[in-house]
Image (tube, grey):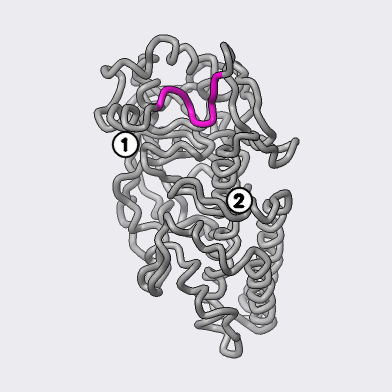
Amino acid sequence: MLEEASLKTLHHQELLSRFKEVRSRTAAICHPLSTEDHLPQVVFYASPPKWHLAHTTWFFEEMILKPYAHDYREFDSRFSYYFNSYYNSIGKRTKREERGSITRPGVNEVYDYRIHVDNGIEKLCEHPLSDDVLDLLSLGIRHEEQHQELLITDLKVALSCNPSHPVYATDVDYAGGYDSQDDGWKTINEGVYTIGAAAEMKEAFDNEQPAHRVYLYPAALRKSLVRNAEYLAFMEDGGYERPELWLDDGWSWKNDHQVSHPMYWMKQEDDWFRYSLSGLQPVDGNELLCHVSYYEADAFAHWAGYRLPIEAEWEAMAAELEWGKRWEWTGSAYRPYPGFRLPSGPTSEYNGKFMVNQMVLRGASPATAQRHSRITYRNFFHPEMRWQFSGIRLAKDQ
């Protein structure tokens, strides 16, 4: 019993240290921003930086402090409505596309809110915590780490709409970079493989579990990701004008939105450029392709004579691949694993209710929290979305 209590105290202290680290990093991401940069919501799916700062704080207040810290005083009762994301079981919320309209409370008040809640969590952690509270604190930390990546991608969307092509930071890009340039293939042998996170992996989200067995047929995955020069060849070969390459949904999306190149690309005279967080950059053919939708990835794979890997193939081969520089589209729909069970309480809305009409991405990107860069992690987005740092890995049947 003494050993168990000591381990719990150590876990308690580690979580508090991680909490402080994660909260500081979110503020550091926003440090280069002006007050005005915190506010715009230029598209419905990308939230303003101010909203991310407040929502991640709301999670700790709503899920932990209000139900478990009995002497806690709520910062502002209106914030429960303003900064709830999608937790219908908790109460009403603002519409996703209207988050940018919350100009009040102001940016400074949101930072005051963060300090208030941080103090509340640290005070709560002065006392022994139940397993339920420790689990929620761990989830809140991982939740904020996810939002750090979304914060980076969302602020890039907002800054990209500024005609001055503003620089977030001269040494920050995330969408550039190269790999080993090895276009060889790694073979997957036919057989049974175990996929998913083991029960003892406490960092894993519920959608990564349970671990289960799958049967895979012989296949191969390309070692390198698709590069800009390859995608330019697809474009120059009329890839965006050839309906036989596209899924019907993708063809309609492309036409409806007049898509003819990856997100953030623009042509000036005869040269292609891409908007990056370090400003406008020429498109380098040897750099890894970035910011394409599932529809574009699938069309490119058809054009190249291959396909996208299914997520089980990707996970089975990940240890032998170079990955982590791009989220990689797979050909798998986002669905629950066999034996998946929703957790009880408000956190039942965390992942499970999104398991429809979305596609799985595997890997990570330079904007991903290091602790989330693992082979079992399942990212997921609607097939038309491309504001994430997403790329393409090819697969083929053997």
Question: Type of residue at label 1?
Answer: Tyr
Q: Main structural element of the magenta stretch: helix, strand or loop? A: loop
* Residue that appears at 62% across and 39% down: 366
* Residue that appears at 40% across and 51% down: 211
| Residue 105 image offset from top left, x and y in percent | 58, 69
Q: In which quarter of the image is residue 228?
A: top right
Write down the residue under mark 1.
215
Q: What stretch is highlighted in magenta?
A: 259-267
Q: Quadrant location of the C terminus?
A: top left
How far apart are labels 2 and 1 at the CA level? 28 Å
| Residue 44 image offset from top left, x and y in percent | 43, 49
Q: Are there few (<14), some (14-19), or many (20+) residues within 10 Å of tag 2?
A: few
* Residue that appears at 52% across and 73% down: 79
Looking at the picture, tell me which residue is in the foreground, 103 or 182.
103
Is residue 151 something one can see in this rendering? yes
Question: Type of residue at label 2?
Answer: Arg
Front: mark 2 or 1:
2
In this view, 343 is above or below 356: below
| Residue 207 image offset from top left, x and y in percent | 41, 54
Q: Residue 75 carries which label?
A: none
Element type where label 2 sits in the image: helix
Element type where label 1 sits in the image: strand
Q: Quadrant of residue 76?
A: bottom right
Earlier along the polypeptide chain: callout 2 or callout 1? 1
Write down the residue under mark 2.
371
* Residue that appears at 51% across and 40% down: 388
Looking at the picture, tell me which residue is in the foreground, 93 or 339.
93
